[in-house]
Each structure stands twice: as C-alpha cells, then as structure tokens.
Image: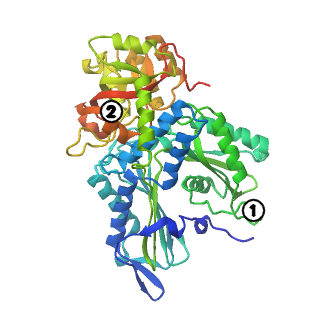
C-alpha cells in the first residue's frame, strides 16, 4: 500500500493568486535554502496585519451572491449589505473586520532542505511577528493564561499563538496565517462514530444533526468542512481545520483504495442542501447559512471512524505565504471598497427607515415598553446608552450579587450589549465594535433580571431554554446584532465609548457606549417567541 501524507497534498493557491512580497531573498547554497530570520518575523507581522483588515476574494464574492440572489430574504440581504459595507470600511486599515481579532494561528510546511539563518527558532519568529502586529495595530488581546485550574488572566499580548509546523520534502517553506475568532472556533466538533453510518441515509442524518447544531452563533454565512475518517482523531480535526480554509481543494474526487484521501463534491452539495434547509440563513434566518462546503474522506482503522466538522465564518481571515528559491510570494487579498457601495447603502437605509426606532432613556421606561411590544422577527434601531459587558465582567458581577445581595446601580436600567471591542486608536471614538455569543451568558439572566438588570440584552446567535424562560418570567427582550460587522458599527452606529468599571479585565472591562440607530433583530420577544427555535 502506498503511503500518502496529508502534508504533501496541501495546496495554498495557484501562481496567479500570489504577488511578490518585498523581503530579503533567500540564499541557496549546496542544495539548501537559507531564509532570513528577521524577514520571517516581518512576514508574520505583515500577514497578521493584512488579515485584520482584508479577506480572500472568494469571501467578498460570497456576500455578493447573497446580496443579489432572488431567493435571499430581505433580512439576508440586509446582513450581506452590512458585511460588504463592513469589508469596505475595514479595508482602509483603521477598524478591523471583526472586534474578535482572533487567536493567531500559523500552519506551516517546512521543506527538509530549508534552513533559518542563525538556526533560529521558526515558531518563536512567527509568534514575535504576530505579537508586533497585534500591538502596532491595537488589535484585541483575547488570550487568557491559566493561574490555576480555575483561575486565569489576560496575557496582554495575544500570545501564545497556535503554531503547527510540519516537515515535508523539498526546498520550500509554505505558511498559512489565520486569525480565528472564538465564535467560529467553538463551532468545531469531533466525534467517534460507528461504521454503521457509512450508508448515504445514515450519514446524511448524522450531518443534518451536526450542521443544525452549528447554529447562528459562529457568524454565518459559513464555509462548512466535513472530514470523515483519519488515522487518529487529531488528524481528522487537523484536516477539517485546513479544509475549511481551502487547503485540500485539489484532492481527487475518486479514491483508489490505497489510502489516499479524496474530496467528494456530491456530498458537498448535500451539505449545502442541509444547511439551506436549516432555515438559519445568514444569521437572521433564510437559506444562506453556508456559501460553500468541503467534504473530505480519509483512510481509517477498521474499528474507528472519526467525524470532524469545522467552519470558517463571515470574517474569514487567512493569507498564505510561500518562500522558495524564487523569493517571497504573498496571497492576493480581495477588496470591497466602492464595488457595492450604492446597492449596500440603499439596502441599509431602507431597512433603517422601516425599522422601529427606539430611543433609550434610563429615566423613562417607555422605550422598554415599546421593545416589549415588538414581536420576534421585528427589526428595531437603538439609540442611547448601553452597557458593554461579557464573560469575565458577568462572573464578577454575579459574585457581587451573591455576596452583597445587589448589583451596582450603574448596571441597572440599561440594555447590556455582550461585546469586547478592540482598543480605540488615536483620533477615533471607538475601536471595532461587535457582538459576542449570547448563549455563554445564559446562566446569568435569571439572577440579573431578578435584580433589575439585563432586561434587554444584545448579542449574536441563539439562546437556550433557560434564557427564554428568564426572558418570559421577567419581561425581557433579546436583540440579535450582526456578527462580523464591527468596522461598520464603529464608523456608523457608535457615537462614544468609555470604560466605567473593571478596567483590570482589559478587553472584558465594562464600558458605556452611546449608540445611534444601531440595527437589531428581535430574536426572542417578551413572550418567549424565538426566531431560532425551529
């Protein structure tokens, strides 16, 4: 049987998808390639800077497809217009595409005849370049380091990075830089299945369950990658992560039985069909939950069958670099600036005009009564003060409630927006600003609502039955915001942003934002009707 290595099958694009990167040329000596250490560090800085503000061309094309597809719902077109406008704003290099600027990931394939000058540590060079990008661009530091099994704190430099370098034959170094947010990462899954599912009907049933479970929290439209088989569970998950980034697009469509992997385009169509039928759509309902799919089949042990599902979200940020004897080549990125401006602006303005305008006034509860009267599926715009708080702040507030029997006065009477913005750059009123996943805060709703707080919450994705029960019991409302539109929000909808408590929590500190006509969807109304509950 032939040995087929996944590492040798990775494809990062064709020649026309790359452009020269002006860095010191590698030296070739006695059949070996020597690469400058400082150039590798600078390469990482450039790559992570670029993917903070731009995405591969196919991602913009995916949004365009939704925008002009006759079958798209009005909500989906609004989401697509928001994401395209967001991309155009982000491309100017001020506000990142998403406020979750992600874990810095690098996948690498290093040829056996490739050296780093001074025998420098490749992983350290790449991590240092990532740290420089996050510091210089004021990108959000989201990594938490453990103090004990149950205690942790922010590392303050977004390190450690997730770096995996694999050895391959040849005289070439290939690198794939990825900024992966927590919402899409948390959608990945791995399970050990019975070989009994190797029947079309049973496999489709299993995939239907897994795809439905992806939900809206990871910021669709998604690229969904499914990998079946693998020599080990870790290989299966690794293949799924890379497949979602297009790294195995060149695999053959039929197998020869010798252990070589394949890409099954028929099952990719089934995955897309199942995603369409879910009704989740591009976040706010519809048919465009997924814009593309990958179905990869690997060899396996006769007794084991791994199944991995991974996604890339609407903020699909990755870029490839190839270093060989010809020099440095950088993947070309897409741009949305100017191409869709008039169409997007018309859709955004029409939706905002038709929405119910809510002016938040903490001293007067008429705004809350209006929100309570809106049925699930309604679009509203919110203007006025909202509190910004997420996981660590909620945990601290709960401890205060448990020990003191009450919450701080400043936490009462205002909507709570689950978010962690990027650092504000000099001369601007806010950093990139967008929602985090609602369901992580579900357990806090009942105690906080009972104390007069969090009656109105704003976030992305669906919520649990526990959250719905608390909302009904206390007359609350859950408003869904669009995930992956943080640059648009910062420029268009946020008038001011300032820290008011828990500054030591860094990006998870509590802030007060002043919104202007911020669009939201009533996802769970005061009666418990839920747009995501199918």
Which comes before the other along the chain, label 2 or label 1? 1
In-image side of 235 versus 485 (left or right)? right
> Which residue appears at 62% of the width and 48% of the height?
308
Q: Secondary structure beneath disc 1?
A: loop
In-image side of 430 versus 288 (left or right)? left
246 is higher (above) or lower (below) than 503: below
Q: Secondary structure beneath disc 2?
A: helix
> Which residue appears at 23% of the width and 38% of the height?
429
Using the image as rendered, state which of residue 23 and residue 145 is in the foreground.
23
Image quarter for residue 333? Answer: bottom left
In-image side of 76 versus 495 (left or right)? right
Where does residue 528 sit, x and y in percent of width and height?
52, 16
Image quarter for residue 222? Answer: top right
| Residues at marks 2 and 1, CA–CA distance in whole angstroms | 52 Å
Q: Estimate how packed mark 1 is, as few (under 14), some (14 to 19) or many (20 or more) residues with alpha carbons within 10 Å.
A: some
Where does residue 339 sit, x and y in percent of width and height?
43, 49
Mark in the foreground, 2 or 1 = 2
Where does residue 395 sit, x and y in percent of width and height?
36, 29
Image quarter for residue 532? Answer: top right
Q: Estimate how packed mark 2 is, as few (under 14), some (14 to 19) or many (20 or more) residues with alpha carbons within 10 Å.
A: many
> Which residue appears at 25% of the width and 20% of the height?
410
Using the image as rendered, state which of residue 184 and residue 496 is in the foreground.
496
- In the rendered image, the quadrant that contains the N terminus is bottom right
Residue 284 showing in the rendered view: no
206 is higher (above) or lower (below) than 356: below
Task: Report the residue marked by disc 2.
Answer: 493
Task: Report the residue marked by disc 1.
Answer: 255
Q: Residue furthest bottom?
A: 30
Q: Residue furthest left?
A: 427
- In the rendered image, the quadrant that contains the C terminus is top right
Where does residue 291 sit, x and y in percent of width and height?
58, 45
């Amino acid at each position: 049987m032939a040995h087929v290595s996944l590492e040798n099958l990775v494809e990062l694009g064709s020649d026309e998808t790359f452009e020269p990167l002006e860095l010191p040329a590698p030296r070739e000596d006695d059949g070996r390639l020597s690469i400058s250490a400082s150039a590798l560090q600078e390469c990482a800085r450039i790559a992570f800077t670029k993917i903070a503000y731009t995405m591969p061309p196919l991602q913009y094309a995916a949004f365009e497809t939704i925008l002009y597809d006759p079958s798209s719902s009005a909500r989906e077109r609004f989401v697509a217009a928001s994401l395209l406008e967001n991309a155009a704003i982000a491309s100017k290099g001020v506000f990142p595409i998403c406020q979750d600027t992600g874990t810095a990931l690098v996948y690498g394939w290093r040829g056996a005849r490739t050296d780093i000058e001074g025998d420098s540590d490749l992983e350290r060079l790449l991590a240092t370049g990532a740290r420089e990008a996050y510091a210089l661009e004021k990108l959000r530091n989201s990594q938490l380091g453990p103090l004990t099994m149950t205690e942790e704190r922010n590392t303050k430099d977004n390190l450690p990075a997730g770096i995996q370098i694999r050895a391959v034959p040849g005289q070439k170094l290939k690198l794939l830089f990825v900024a992966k947010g927590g919402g899409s990462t948390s959608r990945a899954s791995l399970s050990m299945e019975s070989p009994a599912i190797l029947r079309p009907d049973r496999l489709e049933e299993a995939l239907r369950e897994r795809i439905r479970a992806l939900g809206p929290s990871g910021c669709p439209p998604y690229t969904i990658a499914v990998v079946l088989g693998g020599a080990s569970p870790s290989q299966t998950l690794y293949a799924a992560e890379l497949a979602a980034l297009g790294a195995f697009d060149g695999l053959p469509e039929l197998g020869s039985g010798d252990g070589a992997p394949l890409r099954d385009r028929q099952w990719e169509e089934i995955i897309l069909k199942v995603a369409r039928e879910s009704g989740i759509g591009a976040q706010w309902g519809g048919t465009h939950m997924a814009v593309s799919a990958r179905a990869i089949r690997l060899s396996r042990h006769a007794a084991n069958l791994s199944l991995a599902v991974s996604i890339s979200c609407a903020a699909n940020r990755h870029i490839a670099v190839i270093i060989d004897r010809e020099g440095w080549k950088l993947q070309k990125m897409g741009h949305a600036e100017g191409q869709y401006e008039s169409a997007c602006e018309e859709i955004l303005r029409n939706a905002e005009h038709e929405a119910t305008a809510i002016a938040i006034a903490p001293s007067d509860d008429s705004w809350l009564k209006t929100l309570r009267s809106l049925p699930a599926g309604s679009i509203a715009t919110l203007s006025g003060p909202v509190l910004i708080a997420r996981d660590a702040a909620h945990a601290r507030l709960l401890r205060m409630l448990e020990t003191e029997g009450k919450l701080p006065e400043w936490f009462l009477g205002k909507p709570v927006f689950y978010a962690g913005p990027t650092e504000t750059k000099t001369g601007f009123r806010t950093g990139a600003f967008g929602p985090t996943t609602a369901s992580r805060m579900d357990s806090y709703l009942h105690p906080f609502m009972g104390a007069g707080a969090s009656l109105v919450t704003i976030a992305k994705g669906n919520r649990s039955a526990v959250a719905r029960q608390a909302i009904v019991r206390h007359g609350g409302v859950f408003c869904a915001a669009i995930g992956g539109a943080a640059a648009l929000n910062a420029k268009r909808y946020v008038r001011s942003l300032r820290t008011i408590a828990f500054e030591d929590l860094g990006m998870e500190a509590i802030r007060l934002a002043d919104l202007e006509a911020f669009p939201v969807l009533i996802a769970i109304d005061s009666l418990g009707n839920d747009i995501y509950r199918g």
